[in-house]
Image (spheres, rainbow, N blue to C red):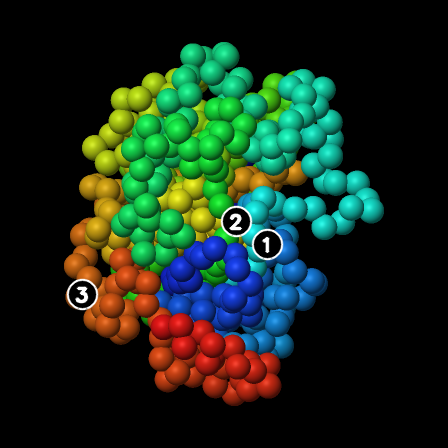
Amino acid sequence: MAPAKQKQPVYVLGVGMTKFIKPRGKVDYTELGFEAGIKAMLDAQINYDDVEQGIACYCYGDSTCGQRVFYQFGMTQIPIFNVNNNCSTGSTGLAIGRNAIAYGAADCVLVVGFEKMMPGSLQTFFNDRENPTGTSGLMMAATRGVTNAPGAAQMFGNAGREYMEKYGAKIEDFAEIARINHLHSGKNPYSQFQDVYTLEQVLKAPMIHEPLTKLQCCPTSDGGAAAVLVSQAFLDARPHLKDQAILIAGQCLATDAPSLFSRSSIDLMGFDMTKFAAKTAMAEAGVTPDDFSVCELHDCFSANEMITIDALGLSAPGKAHELVRSGGITYGGKIVINPSGGLISKGHPLGATGIAQCAELVWHLRGWANNRSVPNTKYALQHNLGLGGAVVVTVYARADGKAAPQVDSATVGKINKLGYNPAVEAKGFTHEQAKATRSKTQASEWALQDTEKKVEARF
């Protein structure tokens, strides 16, 4: 299938996110969504009255949680969509927003992802009906058996085992992926974890499901992230913002092929849909895997990063472990993968993850991520996957087509009028800034309740 011809280009004009934190029930989704949304609109230098569609991204919560969050910005009677697509929910929201703008349904869309999670491994709440990934579970049981480990760790761990059996990867290769991601997260102020570990410490952590030790598994997290997407016309009316606008140069939301049930543990993790989405998104953008210097990919487990490196074409087929061994996935190597720390160390609040990946790459292409920048970054690659299944692969580029500059934080603080650089400092906003961002004519204090006070008290 040929990539769809976009009627007009779509840009990410603003991004914002909360710190990702351990799920302890102390912060509600209303606060997470409010903080992320206000930050993104401040970054885009817009008011909520400019927003023509809202997209809320979450997996855990009752219907219309999106309205509960968005009404805090204003009750402007715009369409608000609630999106749930497992772990790819955030980037699914970005894809829906992009399509709305590309085909003329809106000029400005606000996408907000948020998740308030339960401590511990992912849970199923509807036990009186078929599980959507039940057929995958049956295939795992038929091919690899079932243990007492968390289900997702078994599935992705089995894919890692198959990669070892077929291509010669070693347990140490998976541990090295986690070591690098934990190392990277030390430069990300939003990361849930910022501890650095040696390879030996990663290997000696409690075994969850071989080859995966605890330090190779992402945690559950509470967090929010948001992005403002705009059309060419919207951007042209604000020429002073063009330097911060990042083009969505290529994007594909894909689902599974029949190969999902080929009896391969690698295929069972959506390998084929990732390959398809990557090929489609890169074709639309007119790039190849060798054009990327930075990538945020879905490392829910180190084993998934391994097979995804392969599926995205960042290594030769069956050679992902060799790229890892050579230092090829960190600074000084072929490509920096997960400079944010990835899901393993940054955290994984499901609805926010894909948008947080977007924020990280936007900061890199603007030149704002100056404490973890990658030289000569011209294109950035994003991969966000959910079992069940869905994957979104996105290619980003600067609006001017040039490589990212290096911008010092003092200059960033002047550009965004916030006085600080959000890429390297996780700060907040004032009541005056929030008020200037909320709807000027249709704001409701009743809808807001005490959310803003709670959020600002944490700053």
The residue that mark 2 highlights is 220
- Pointers 3 and 1 in contact (CB under 8 A)? no
Residue hosting label 3 = 411
At 47% across and 16% down in the image, what residue appears? 164
First in residue order: circle 1 vs circle 2: 1
Q: What separation in Å lies between label 3 and label 1 (alpha carbons)?
A: 40 Å
Which comes sooner in the sequence, label 3 or label 1?
Answer: 1
For the residue carrying disc 2, how many other residues have a C-alpha within 10 Å: few (<14), some (14-19), or many (20+)? many
Which type of secondary structure does the marked residue at label 1 adopt?
A: loop
The type of residue carrying mark 3 is Thr
284 relative position to 417: left or right: right
> As displayed, is residue 99 above or below residue 147?
below
- The one nearer the camera, 330 or 52, is 330
Closer to the chain start, of discs 3 and 2, is 2
Q: Which residue is mark 1?
A: 118
Name the residue rendered at 49%, 45% in the picture: 219
Q: Look at 73% across and 34% down and name the residue there.
A: 134
Q: How many marks?
A: 3
User: Can residue 354 be seen at all in this image of the molecule?
Assistant: no
Q: CA distance from mark 3 to mark 2?
A: 35 Å
In this view, the mark in front (3 or 2): 2
